[in-house]
Image: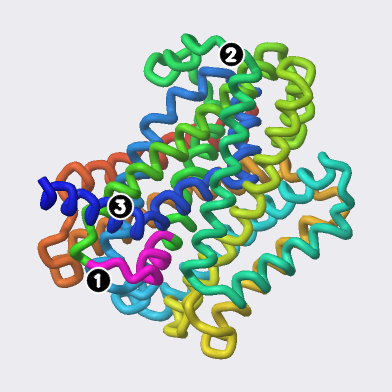
Amino acid sequence: MYYFFYRWKRRLLIALALIGPGIITAVADNDAAGISSFSIAASTFGYQIMIILIPIMVLLAVTQEIGARIAIVAEKGLADLIRERYGVRLAIAMYLLLFLVNLAVVVMDVAGLKAALSLFGLNPTMFLPMIIAGLFAFVVFSNYTIVERFFFVLVLFYITYVASAFLAKPDWGQAVTSLVIPQGGITPRFFYVAIAIVGTTVTAWGQFFINSYVKDKRITLEHLRYNRIEIYLGALITVTLTFFTMVAVAATLFTHNIAIADAADAALAIAPFAGAFATVLFGVGLLFAGVLGCIVVALTTAYAFSEFFGYSGSLDESFRKSRLFYTTLLVQLSIGTIVAMLPGVSLFRITLIANFINGLILPVIFYFLYQFANNEAVMGRYTNTKFQNWMLAGSAVVIVLASLMGLVGQVVGW
Protein backbone atom coordinates (compact mmCIF):
# COMPACT_ATOMS: atom_id res chain seq x y z
CA MET A 1 0.00 0.00 0.00
CA TYR A 2 2.83 2.38 0.88
CA TYR A 3 4.51 1.68 -2.45
CA PHE A 4 1.22 2.33 -4.27
CA PHE A 5 0.76 5.76 -2.69
CA TYR A 6 4.45 6.60 -3.10
CA ARG A 7 4.28 5.79 -6.81
CA TRP A 8 1.18 7.93 -7.39
CA LYS A 9 2.58 10.77 -5.29
CA ARG A 10 5.74 10.71 -7.40
CA ARG A 11 3.71 10.73 -10.63
CA LEU A 12 1.62 13.64 -9.38
CA LEU A 13 4.69 15.68 -8.45
CA ILE A 14 6.26 15.01 -11.86
CA ALA A 15 3.04 16.04 -13.60
CA LEU A 16 2.81 19.25 -11.58
CA ALA A 17 6.45 20.07 -12.32
CA LEU A 18 5.87 19.63 -16.06
CA ILE A 19 2.69 21.72 -16.25
CA GLY A 20 3.24 24.87 -18.25
CA PRO A 21 3.96 24.73 -21.98
CA GLY A 22 0.72 23.06 -23.09
CA ILE A 23 -1.70 25.06 -20.94
CA ILE A 24 0.06 28.43 -21.31
CA THR A 25 0.43 28.13 -25.09
CA ALA A 26 -3.16 26.98 -25.60
CA VAL A 27 -4.76 29.57 -23.31
CA ALA A 28 -2.56 32.35 -24.73
CA ASP A 29 -4.21 31.56 -28.08
CA ASN A 30 -7.29 33.13 -26.47
CA ASP A 31 -5.53 36.48 -26.29
CA ALA A 32 -7.17 39.87 -26.79
CA ALA A 33 -7.16 39.31 -30.54
CA GLY A 34 -8.78 35.93 -30.02
CA ILE A 35 -11.41 37.24 -27.63
CA SER A 36 -12.31 39.93 -30.17
CA SER A 37 -12.58 37.33 -32.95
CA PHE A 38 -14.75 35.07 -30.79
CA SER A 39 -16.98 38.02 -29.88
CA ILE A 40 -17.39 39.13 -33.49
CA ALA A 41 -18.07 35.55 -34.61
CA ALA A 42 -20.66 34.88 -31.90
CA SER A 43 -22.41 38.22 -32.41
CA THR A 44 -22.60 37.50 -36.16
CA PHE A 45 -23.51 33.80 -36.20
CA GLY A 46 -24.67 33.07 -32.68
CA TYR A 47 -24.54 29.45 -31.53
CA GLN A 48 -24.04 28.32 -35.15
CA ILE A 49 -20.30 29.10 -35.07
CA MET A 50 -19.75 26.65 -32.19
CA ILE A 51 -19.87 23.65 -34.53
CA ILE A 52 -16.19 24.27 -35.33
CA LEU A 53 -14.97 24.17 -31.70
CA ILE A 54 -14.54 20.41 -31.21
CA PRO A 55 -12.60 19.93 -34.49
CA ILE A 56 -10.42 22.90 -33.50
CA MET A 57 -9.76 21.34 -30.08
CA VAL A 58 -8.64 18.06 -31.68
CA LEU A 59 -6.44 19.85 -34.21
CA LEU A 60 -4.89 22.03 -31.50
CA ALA A 61 -4.13 19.01 -29.32
CA VAL A 62 -2.59 17.02 -32.18
CA THR A 63 -0.42 19.82 -33.60
CA GLN A 64 0.80 21.08 -30.23
CA GLU A 65 1.73 17.54 -29.20
CA ILE A 66 3.70 17.04 -32.42
CA GLY A 67 5.56 20.32 -31.94
CA ALA A 68 6.41 19.57 -28.33
CA ARG A 69 7.48 16.00 -29.15
CA ILE A 70 9.84 17.27 -31.85
CA ALA A 71 11.47 19.63 -29.34
CA ILE A 72 11.83 16.92 -26.68
CA VAL A 73 13.18 14.21 -28.98
CA ALA A 74 15.38 16.36 -31.26
CA GLU A 75 16.35 18.77 -28.46
CA LYS A 76 16.00 21.54 -31.04
CA GLY A 77 13.38 24.13 -31.83
CA LEU A 78 11.27 24.12 -34.98
CA ALA A 79 13.18 27.14 -36.30
CA ASP A 80 16.50 25.37 -35.63
CA LEU A 81 15.41 22.42 -37.73
CA ILE A 82 14.10 24.58 -40.58
CA ARG A 83 17.46 26.40 -40.79
CA GLU A 84 19.51 23.22 -40.60
CA ARG A 85 17.42 21.16 -43.04
CA TYR A 86 16.28 23.82 -45.53
CA GLY A 87 19.02 26.44 -45.45
CA VAL A 88 19.46 30.05 -44.42
CA ARG A 89 17.41 31.58 -47.27
CA LEU A 90 14.23 29.76 -46.35
CA ALA A 91 14.96 30.44 -42.68
CA ILE A 92 15.10 34.18 -43.39
CA ALA A 93 11.88 34.06 -45.44
CA MET A 94 10.07 32.09 -42.72
CA TYR A 95 11.31 34.42 -40.01
CA LEU A 96 10.19 37.54 -41.87
CA LEU A 97 6.74 35.99 -42.39
CA LEU A 98 6.52 35.02 -38.72
CA PHE A 99 7.79 38.43 -37.60
CA LEU A 100 5.11 40.28 -39.59
CA VAL A 101 2.26 37.97 -38.60
CA ASN A 102 3.31 38.03 -34.95
CA LEU A 103 3.66 41.81 -35.03
CA ALA A 104 0.06 42.09 -36.24
CA VAL A 105 -1.04 39.89 -33.34
CA VAL A 106 0.99 41.94 -30.84
CA VAL A 107 -0.62 45.12 -32.19
CA MET A 108 -4.05 43.56 -31.71
CA ASP A 109 -3.21 42.44 -28.18
CA VAL A 110 -1.85 45.84 -27.19
CA ALA A 111 -4.90 47.46 -28.81
CA GLY A 112 -7.09 45.12 -26.76
CA LEU A 113 -5.19 46.12 -23.65
CA LYS A 114 -5.70 49.76 -24.60
CA ALA A 115 -9.45 49.20 -25.06
CA ALA A 116 -9.69 47.45 -21.67
CA LEU A 117 -7.94 50.37 -19.95
CA SER A 118 -10.37 52.80 -21.57
CA LEU A 119 -13.25 50.57 -20.49
CA PHE A 120 -12.26 51.13 -16.85
CA GLY A 121 -11.68 54.86 -17.27
CA LEU A 122 -7.87 54.65 -17.25
CA ASN A 123 -5.90 56.86 -19.63
CA PRO A 124 -4.12 54.53 -22.13
CA THR A 125 -1.60 57.22 -23.04
CA MET A 126 -0.33 57.14 -19.48
CA PHE A 127 -0.85 53.55 -18.40
CA LEU A 128 -0.22 51.53 -21.56
CA PRO A 129 3.51 52.42 -22.00
CA MET A 130 4.00 51.83 -18.26
CA ILE A 131 2.45 48.35 -18.46
CA ILE A 132 4.46 47.34 -21.54
CA ALA A 133 7.71 48.67 -20.05
CA GLY A 134 6.95 46.88 -16.78
CA LEU A 135 6.29 43.59 -18.62
CA PHE A 136 9.56 43.84 -20.52
CA ALA A 137 11.56 44.64 -17.37
CA PHE A 138 9.87 41.77 -15.52
CA VAL A 139 10.83 39.25 -18.23
CA VAL A 140 14.42 40.52 -18.45
CA PHE A 141 15.10 40.46 -14.71
CA SER A 142 13.24 37.23 -13.92
CA ASN A 143 13.91 33.64 -14.94
CA TYR A 144 11.95 30.88 -16.64
CA THR A 145 10.25 29.65 -13.45
CA ILE A 146 9.11 33.07 -12.27
CA VAL A 147 7.83 34.07 -15.73
CA GLU A 148 5.93 30.79 -16.01
CA ARG A 149 4.26 31.36 -12.63
CA PHE A 150 3.27 34.84 -13.77
CA PHE A 151 1.69 33.34 -16.89
CA PHE A 152 -0.31 30.96 -14.72
CA VAL A 153 -1.63 33.89 -12.65
CA LEU A 154 -2.80 35.56 -15.87
CA VAL A 155 -4.46 32.32 -17.01
CA LEU A 156 -6.58 32.27 -13.83
CA PHE A 157 -8.32 35.51 -14.86
CA TYR A 158 -9.89 33.76 -17.85
CA ILE A 159 -12.45 32.35 -15.42
CA THR A 160 -14.20 35.73 -15.80
CA TYR A 161 -15.55 34.60 -19.18
CA VAL A 162 -17.14 31.55 -17.58
CA ALA A 163 -18.88 33.80 -15.06
CA SER A 164 -20.00 36.18 -17.83
CA ALA A 165 -21.61 33.28 -19.69
CA PHE A 166 -23.67 32.25 -16.67
CA LEU A 167 -24.75 35.86 -16.02
CA ALA A 168 -26.00 36.01 -19.64
CA LYS A 169 -28.53 33.24 -18.81
CA PRO A 170 -28.21 31.44 -22.16
CA ASP A 171 -30.14 28.49 -23.51
CA TRP A 172 -27.61 25.89 -22.37
CA GLY A 173 -29.37 23.13 -24.25
CA GLN A 174 -29.00 24.95 -27.55
CA ALA A 175 -25.44 25.98 -26.74
CA VAL A 176 -24.28 22.42 -26.02
CA THR A 177 -26.25 20.96 -28.93
CA SER A 178 -24.61 23.46 -31.28
CA LEU A 179 -21.25 21.84 -30.60
CA VAL A 180 -22.28 18.69 -32.46
CA ILE A 181 -25.35 19.57 -34.55
CA PRO A 182 -25.03 22.25 -37.27
CA GLN A 183 -27.36 25.22 -36.85
CA GLY A 184 -28.45 27.14 -39.96
CA GLY A 185 -26.89 27.43 -43.41
CA ILE A 186 -23.21 27.88 -44.18
CA THR A 187 -22.10 30.83 -46.32
CA PRO A 188 -18.70 31.99 -47.64
CA ARG A 189 -18.71 34.58 -44.85
CA PHE A 190 -19.04 31.73 -42.36
CA PHE A 191 -15.95 30.06 -43.87
CA TYR A 192 -14.01 33.33 -43.66
CA VAL A 193 -14.84 33.81 -39.97
CA ALA A 194 -14.28 30.11 -39.23
CA ILE A 195 -10.75 30.24 -40.67
CA ALA A 196 -10.09 33.36 -38.56
CA ILE A 197 -11.18 31.39 -35.47
CA VAL A 198 -8.89 28.52 -36.47
CA GLY A 199 -6.09 31.01 -37.07
CA THR A 200 -6.44 32.59 -33.64
CA THR A 201 -6.62 29.21 -31.84
CA VAL A 202 -4.27 26.89 -33.75
CA THR A 203 -1.82 29.70 -34.35
CA ALA A 204 1.37 29.69 -36.39
CA TRP A 205 3.15 31.45 -33.53
CA GLY A 206 1.79 28.84 -31.11
CA GLN A 207 3.59 26.05 -32.96
CA PHE A 208 6.90 27.88 -32.64
CA PHE A 209 6.25 28.96 -29.04
CA ILE A 210 5.43 25.55 -27.58
CA ASN A 211 8.42 24.08 -29.40
CA SER A 212 10.81 26.67 -28.00
CA TYR A 213 9.14 26.84 -24.59
CA VAL A 214 9.36 23.06 -24.10
CA LYS A 215 13.03 23.20 -25.06
CA ASP A 216 13.62 26.09 -22.63
CA LYS A 217 11.91 24.09 -19.85
CA ARG A 218 14.32 21.21 -20.56
CA ILE A 219 11.69 18.46 -20.60
CA THR A 220 13.29 15.07 -21.24
CA LEU A 221 12.15 11.93 -23.07
CA GLU A 222 11.26 10.10 -19.87
CA HIS A 223 8.56 12.71 -19.23
CA LEU A 224 7.15 12.69 -22.75
CA ARG A 225 3.80 11.14 -21.79
CA TYR A 226 3.25 13.64 -18.97
CA ASN A 227 3.87 16.46 -21.40
CA ARG A 228 1.41 14.91 -23.86
CA ILE A 229 -1.33 14.78 -21.20
CA GLU A 230 -0.69 18.40 -20.24
CA ILE A 231 -0.97 19.49 -23.87
CA TYR A 232 -4.28 17.67 -24.30
CA LEU A 233 -5.53 19.28 -21.09
CA GLY A 234 -4.46 22.69 -22.41
CA ALA A 235 -6.42 22.18 -25.64
CA LEU A 236 -9.52 21.20 -23.64
CA ILE A 237 -9.22 24.21 -21.34
CA THR A 238 -8.71 26.77 -24.12
CA VAL A 239 -11.65 25.55 -26.23
CA THR A 240 -13.85 25.39 -23.13
CA LEU A 241 -12.99 29.04 -22.44
CA THR A 242 -13.76 29.88 -26.07
CA PHE A 243 -17.12 28.16 -25.70
CA PHE A 244 -18.09 30.22 -22.64
CA THR A 245 -16.90 33.46 -24.30
CA MET A 246 -19.06 32.75 -27.34
CA VAL A 247 -22.03 31.75 -25.18
CA ALA A 248 -21.89 35.08 -23.30
CA VAL A 249 -22.01 37.01 -26.58
CA ALA A 250 -24.45 34.78 -28.48
CA ALA A 251 -26.97 34.77 -25.62
CA THR A 252 -27.01 38.56 -25.44
CA LEU A 253 -25.81 40.41 -28.54
CA PHE A 254 -26.73 37.89 -31.26
CA THR A 255 -30.13 37.27 -29.70
CA HIS A 256 -30.88 41.01 -29.75
CA ASN A 257 -29.26 41.67 -33.17
CA ILE A 258 -26.56 43.97 -31.82
CA ALA A 259 -23.45 44.44 -33.98
CA ILE A 260 -20.07 45.03 -32.34
CA ALA A 261 -16.61 46.12 -33.44
CA ASP A 262 -14.44 44.26 -30.92
CA ALA A 263 -14.35 42.64 -27.47
CA ALA A 264 -14.52 46.00 -25.67
CA ASP A 265 -17.77 46.75 -27.50
CA ALA A 266 -19.04 43.32 -26.48
CA ALA A 267 -18.20 44.02 -22.84
CA LEU A 268 -20.24 47.25 -22.91
CA ALA A 269 -23.10 45.87 -24.99
CA ILE A 270 -23.88 42.87 -22.77
CA ALA A 271 -24.56 45.06 -19.73
CA PRO A 272 -28.30 45.65 -20.44
CA PHE A 273 -28.88 41.90 -20.77
CA ALA A 274 -26.45 40.31 -18.31
CA GLY A 275 -25.84 43.18 -15.90
CA ALA A 276 -23.03 45.64 -15.21
CA PHE A 277 -21.03 42.99 -13.35
CA ALA A 278 -20.85 40.91 -16.54
CA THR A 279 -19.34 43.92 -18.30
CA VAL A 280 -16.72 44.24 -15.56
CA LEU A 281 -15.88 40.53 -15.78
CA PHE A 282 -15.63 40.65 -19.58
CA GLY A 283 -13.42 43.74 -19.39
CA VAL A 284 -11.12 42.20 -16.76
CA GLY A 285 -10.75 39.12 -18.93
CA LEU A 286 -9.87 41.28 -21.95
CA LEU A 287 -7.28 43.20 -19.90
CA PHE A 288 -5.38 40.13 -18.77
CA ALA A 289 -5.81 38.39 -22.14
CA GLY A 290 -4.07 41.37 -23.70
CA VAL A 291 -1.22 41.20 -21.18
CA LEU A 292 -0.69 37.45 -21.67
CA GLY A 293 -1.05 37.62 -25.44
CA CYS A 294 1.35 40.47 -26.17
CA ILE A 295 4.16 39.06 -24.03
CA VAL A 296 3.80 35.43 -25.20
CA VAL A 297 3.57 36.30 -28.91
CA ALA A 298 6.50 38.74 -28.70
CA LEU A 299 8.48 36.03 -26.87
CA THR A 300 7.72 33.67 -29.75
CA THR A 301 9.35 36.09 -32.18
CA ALA A 302 12.38 36.38 -29.90
CA TYR A 303 12.71 32.60 -29.59
CA ALA A 304 12.36 32.22 -33.35
CA PHE A 305 15.04 34.83 -34.06
CA SER A 306 17.49 33.05 -31.77
CA GLU A 307 16.81 29.66 -33.38
CA PHE A 308 16.59 30.74 -37.02
CA PHE A 309 19.92 32.56 -36.85
CA GLY A 310 21.76 30.45 -34.27
CA TYR A 311 21.95 32.91 -31.36
CA SER A 312 21.55 32.22 -27.66
CA GLY A 313 18.05 32.87 -26.32
CA SER A 314 16.52 31.73 -23.03
CA LEU A 315 14.48 33.15 -20.17
CA ASP A 316 17.12 31.71 -17.83
CA GLU A 317 19.86 33.80 -19.41
CA SER A 318 20.77 37.40 -18.61
CA PHE A 319 20.27 40.32 -20.97
CA ARG A 320 24.04 40.43 -21.57
CA LYS A 321 24.17 36.78 -22.65
CA SER A 322 20.94 36.85 -24.72
CA ARG A 323 21.05 40.46 -25.86
CA LEU A 324 19.53 39.82 -29.31
CA PHE A 325 16.79 37.64 -27.81
CA TYR A 326 15.62 40.36 -25.44
CA THR A 327 16.14 43.11 -28.03
CA THR A 328 13.81 41.30 -30.44
CA LEU A 329 11.24 41.06 -27.65
CA LEU A 330 11.58 44.80 -27.00
CA VAL A 331 11.28 45.67 -30.70
CA GLN A 332 8.00 43.76 -31.10
CA LEU A 333 6.50 45.21 -27.92
CA SER A 334 7.62 48.75 -28.81
CA ILE A 335 6.30 48.68 -32.38
CA GLY A 336 3.06 47.08 -31.21
CA THR A 337 2.57 49.81 -28.60
CA ILE A 338 3.37 52.66 -30.99
CA VAL A 339 0.98 51.38 -33.67
CA ALA A 340 -1.79 50.63 -31.18
CA MET A 341 -1.47 54.15 -29.72
CA LEU A 342 -1.97 55.83 -33.10
CA PRO A 343 -5.29 57.67 -33.26
CA GLY A 344 -7.94 55.91 -35.30
CA VAL A 345 -6.38 52.44 -35.01
CA SER A 346 -9.27 50.01 -34.70
CA LEU A 347 -8.76 46.52 -33.38
CA PHE A 348 -11.76 45.38 -35.43
CA ARG A 349 -10.28 46.50 -38.75
CA ILE A 350 -7.33 44.17 -38.43
CA THR A 351 -8.57 41.40 -36.12
CA LEU A 352 -10.37 39.11 -38.56
CA ILE A 353 -7.94 39.87 -41.40
CA ALA A 354 -4.84 39.09 -39.32
CA ASN A 355 -6.36 35.96 -37.81
CA PHE A 356 -7.55 34.82 -41.25
CA ILE A 357 -3.95 35.17 -42.50
CA ASN A 358 -2.81 33.22 -39.44
CA GLY A 359 -5.17 30.45 -40.46
CA LEU A 360 -4.12 30.67 -44.09
CA ILE A 361 -0.44 30.00 -43.35
CA LEU A 362 -1.11 27.03 -41.06
CA PRO A 363 -0.72 24.48 -43.92
CA VAL A 364 2.87 25.71 -44.33
CA ILE A 365 3.54 25.07 -40.64
CA PHE A 366 1.83 21.68 -40.88
CA TYR A 367 4.16 20.79 -43.76
CA PHE A 368 7.22 21.31 -41.58
CA LEU A 369 5.64 19.45 -38.66
CA TYR A 370 4.87 16.54 -41.01
CA GLN A 371 8.37 16.45 -42.45
CA PHE A 372 10.23 16.58 -39.14
CA ALA A 373 7.87 14.37 -37.15
CA ASN A 374 8.17 11.59 -39.76
CA ASN A 375 11.93 11.84 -40.19
CA GLU A 376 13.52 8.91 -38.36
CA ALA A 377 16.90 10.64 -38.41
CA VAL A 378 15.33 13.40 -36.28
CA MET A 379 12.72 11.47 -34.28
CA GLY A 380 14.02 7.92 -34.05
CA ARG A 381 11.14 5.70 -32.92
CA TYR A 382 9.01 8.69 -31.89
CA THR A 383 7.63 9.45 -35.35
CA ASN A 384 4.00 10.32 -36.03
CA THR A 385 1.14 7.85 -35.99
CA LYS A 386 -1.04 7.43 -39.08
CA PHE A 387 -3.83 9.35 -37.34
CA GLN A 388 -1.54 12.33 -36.70
CA ASN A 389 -0.39 12.35 -40.31
CA TRP A 390 -3.96 12.19 -41.57
CA MET A 391 -4.91 15.05 -39.25
CA LEU A 392 -2.10 17.25 -40.56
CA ALA A 393 -2.76 16.49 -44.23
CA GLY A 394 -6.56 16.51 -44.00
CA SER A 395 -6.64 19.73 -41.96
CA ALA A 396 -4.32 21.45 -44.43
CA VAL A 397 -6.64 20.55 -47.33
CA VAL A 398 -9.76 21.67 -45.45
CA ILE A 399 -8.13 24.96 -44.42
CA VAL A 400 -7.02 25.72 -47.99
CA LEU A 401 -10.48 24.98 -49.45
CA ALA A 402 -12.32 26.91 -46.73
CA SER A 403 -9.90 29.83 -47.12
CA LEU A 404 -10.52 29.98 -50.87
CA MET A 405 -14.28 29.99 -50.35
CA GLY A 406 -13.96 32.66 -47.68
CA LEU A 407 -11.75 34.83 -49.86
CA VAL A 408 -14.08 34.54 -52.85
CA GLY A 409 -16.98 35.48 -50.60
CA GLN A 410 -15.12 38.56 -49.34
CA VAL A 411 -14.20 39.65 -52.88
CA VAL A 412 -17.65 39.27 -54.43
CA GLY A 413 -19.51 40.31 -51.29
CA TRP A 414 -21.39 37.07 -50.55
What's the amino acid at mark 2?
Pro
Q: Quadrant of the N terminus?
A: top left
Query: For the residue carrying disc 1, how many other residues have a C-alpha within 10 Å: few (<14), some (14-19), or many (20+)?
Result: many
Q: Are marks 2 and 3 in contact (CB under 8 Å)?
A: no
Percent x, y of residue 357: 54, 48
State the CA–CA distance, disc 1 to disc 2. 47 Å
Q: Residue 107 occupies which quadrant of the picture?
A: bottom right
**Element on which disc 3 rests:** helix
Q: Determine if the magenta segment contains residue 217.
A: yes
**Mark 3 residue type:** Glu
Give me the disc on residue 74: 1
The residue singled out by tag 3 in the image is 65
Mark 1: amino acid:
Ala
Which residue in the structure is indicated by mark 2? 170
Res 161 seen here: yes
Q: Which residues are magenta?
A: 210-220
What secondary structure is marked by label 1? helix
**Along the line of sight, the residue nearer the viewer: 58 or 190:** 58
